[in-house]
Image: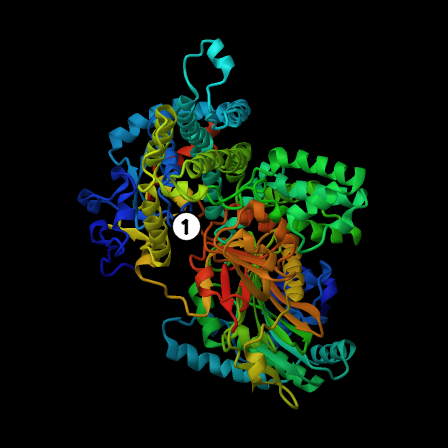
Amino acid sequence: MASEKKEFPAPSTVAIAEGTEAAQAAYPFYMQFEDEDDRRFWFYNSMHFPEPMTAFDMVTAEGAYCALGASNTRVHSLPTTLGIDYRVINGRVYIGGNAVTDPDEIARRSVEFEKRAFYYYENWERLYDQWKDKMRTLISDAEALPALDLPDFEPLENVHAGKGVASNHYLLDTYHKTLEGYFRMWHHHFEFLLLGYGAYMVFFDFCKQAFPEITDQTIARMVAGFEAEIFRPDDEVKRLSRCAVDLGIDGKFMDGVSADDLIASLEQSGTAGAEWLAELEKSRNPWFNVNVGDGFYHYHRSWNDDLSLPFSAIPGYIAKIKSGEDISRPIDELKAEREKLIDGYRDLLGSDEERAAYDQMIELACRVFPYVEGHKFYCEHWYTNLFFNKIREYGALFVEQGLIDDAEDVFHLNRYEVEQAIIIVMTSWSTGSPPRGQKHFRPLISERKAAIDVWAQMDASPALGPVPDIIDDPAIVMLWGITRENLDTWLNGDEGSDSELRGFAASNGIAEGTARVIKSVQEIDRLNEGDILVCQVTNPTWAPIFQKISAAVSDIGGSMSHAAIVAREYGLPAVVGTGKATAKIRDGQRIRVDGARGLVTLLD
Amino acid sequence: MTNISWFQDIGLNDRPTVGGKGGSLGELTSAGIDVPPGFVVRTDAFEKFIVALDADEPIRTPVEALDPDNLDEVGRVTAAIRERIENAAMVSDVEADIRSAYATLCKGDPVAVRSSATTEDAEDASFAGLQDTYLWVIGADDVVAMVRRCWASLYSVESVCYRRKQGLHEAGVAMGVVVQQMINADAAGVMFTRSPTTGDRSVITIEGAWGLGSAVVSGEVTPDRWVIGKLTDEITVRDISDKHIKQVPKAGSGIEDQAVDEAERQSPCLSDEDLIHLKEIAQRTEKHYGRPQDIEWAIADGNIYLLQSRPETVWSQKDESPVAAPQSNPLKHVMNVFGGRKND
């Protein structure tokens, strides 16, 4: 189809937006494109990093790619691929794979792979249980990191104990431990991930060949687990709603009442109020440690940090409970439906030989899938939230020390600059002189904030550099869904009409309604019953508002994304990964969402 | 020898004496699927008729001697035979039986008269459409005339050439004729229990347009098209086309094209409820036969009828190698993903 060989722009030809050169230079040199990079193919990782990155948040890319590559290259020895390189330009993260193509090297790596990956598959349940223990330890270690405290005098007990190391040292120590924990978490994140996706892909590919018209969603439903952690936060909101009804305090929960006002009023509501607040605490730890985004940005705050999202869902659930509706997830029904699908597709296969292969593949896929679904709660949500909140504490300290104006501004410094600021504060505490750099960070921060705004308005090329003949890197195909076909689509531009948007068919059904373009979680109050949610990325923490809406459309995500999983659970039509729904759809516009075809039509 | 059999009394095993279409309609009827009622003029009746004609002046021997590549000769010989069939006197007991069965079936209501050849709809060849079908036939006189015309169609150039190329013996060639109450369909079409485009066994493909199904079968209208998951009931494809005409009964008898209202043209000819209902019937039919089917359907006043079901032939004849074979170590399957994709 590529009659004329088209190419994406070479990295060296991509101009840094005017006036943002200094902000671009704030990213460490090893993340910047160099001339040699022109020879390689890069694509914009819009799935994980849909927005321009602040200087600090690039630590997520660093940690993730350090660990992903280690797992592929050295730990499990994936035969055909090594790790993933990353670069950042105009705030956008581009990544490139490292395929192994030499047959001898593939053979050498395959031998190692079988010794390593097969061991993981064989011992999956035991290793995954062990993984959860490791993650819980990692999380409690992070929670146990000390508060950032600079007392006027070193506490006397430290002196009498002969501790010999003063408090200012622990600012640096805690920072290093915070970073160390984050990098470590990413290793845990990738310990099983590629193997899990791979086993799923094997089954997926088989189904697509045996049943060419099967939908991605149907395959996903055949392996879906129903006890996955990602469903728990929403389940807890339902539990709290039922609790409020049982305690007779449901009248307190009304649309438009802020979380703070509500809690204050419950505190005045005697034992019933106290009892409910005690239940809330149980839910919060750990289940409200979910971020309202995908956990890759510092501003994806958790439910615990901002209760408005879970609280906004309670009045709707209460209304349903009072009208006699059963709002619990029908797990037995879902399981029965899954079994029906698995058996039904098996029966449709052409031979006993195929059925035997199918059974082998689905058995493995179902065994590994709980990890694929479950890891995000521990990694991207719970741990990431702890991590960014610890950095926020440093931000507050820097405000106190007069280095910056707002604790959130710390995220506009790169991680080395944060360390500089820490050294400054430590030094000032030790010397008794005012901290240096009072004038150093503020201009940098305002320059970088302005750059983020500029970059956010720019279109990022979906890819850079020469187009590879084939995409044979299982990591890239699995995690990003990048295939030669969609590169051709990107190269040939958007051929869709102005009134249509295409994305992944995430959840079946058709709905027509008023679009609410929700750019941040603070805006979710604007959603009315029956509206269609249009957002950049949804994730399981948005689940509670799925009871209200009639369909969902997102810029980012694939048919295995959590938005898709939740939409299927709620039986809502959803189209994800449209690329530009939030830019093309006007708030209040009437749209039609066809979840089976992955099509969004703008009706006026 | 009986001349007539009712649908409920026959099945696929009767194909040698009622033809493929008649056997199939009988089979569907006995399977409890809604089929418009009807009867078959059995091959025995044809045999009586043709034997009488053959005695006058041979038919079968000269046909069997034809060279299928000599189209001029085939055309000349078959035209003469067809003319004889259409004009010769009908065997009297056959005519009486047809008239009586027609009276029992319906009192002057429209029927479809369809040829039901014993070679047609054989499992090894999609041989549909080579014989004639007459729609919206009204009155016993016309029914008898159309039966005769169906018989004559066995001697069309196409049919004869097909038989000659296949080397079939003329003595074994016979034809039944189906006389079936006709449904004044609001919409009609075809459906496939195995995807005609991909061979997928897990979906039902439904095609339909306004009016009688003949418009879809003949290709005069681009039908609406839907794909529905057998196990999921999900309608994953909805291609609604511009259905500019529909075929409807003509005043008197026969059918005619009619322009479709502007508003209706672009509207789906089936509701989701109808689609799911059709899908269920398709699955029931497939299950009854134990193999994929190509089905003709019609819907009138919300009632769905099947007009035909025959085995799917295109994909079934492909030599299908299994998508994957079991591995002694099931983990080896992951090498399909991790070991490098084979471009075979």
Indicate left or right for A492 with A126 as reference. left
x then y, percent, for residue A423: 34, 29
x then y, percent, for residue A201: 45, 40
Label 1 CA crowd tier, 10 Å (few <14, some 14–19, many 20+): many
Instruction: Check the residue under mark 1 and report the chain it is in.
Output: A
Q: How is the image coloured?
A: rainbow
- Whether residue B37 is visible here, answered yes or no, is yes
Please tell me in which quadrant of the rendered image residue B212 appears.
bottom right
Q: Mark 1 — residue?
A: A50
x then y, percent, for residue A342: 59, 42
Please tell me in which quadrant of the rendered image residue B12 appears.
bottom right
Q: Is residue A512 above or below residue A234?
A: below
Which residue does the image show at 60% across and 39% down from the upper left?
A: A288
Q: Amino acid at mark 1?
A: Pro
Indicate left or right for A455 with A14 as reference. right
Which residue does the image show at 78% across and 43% down from the upper left?
A: A269
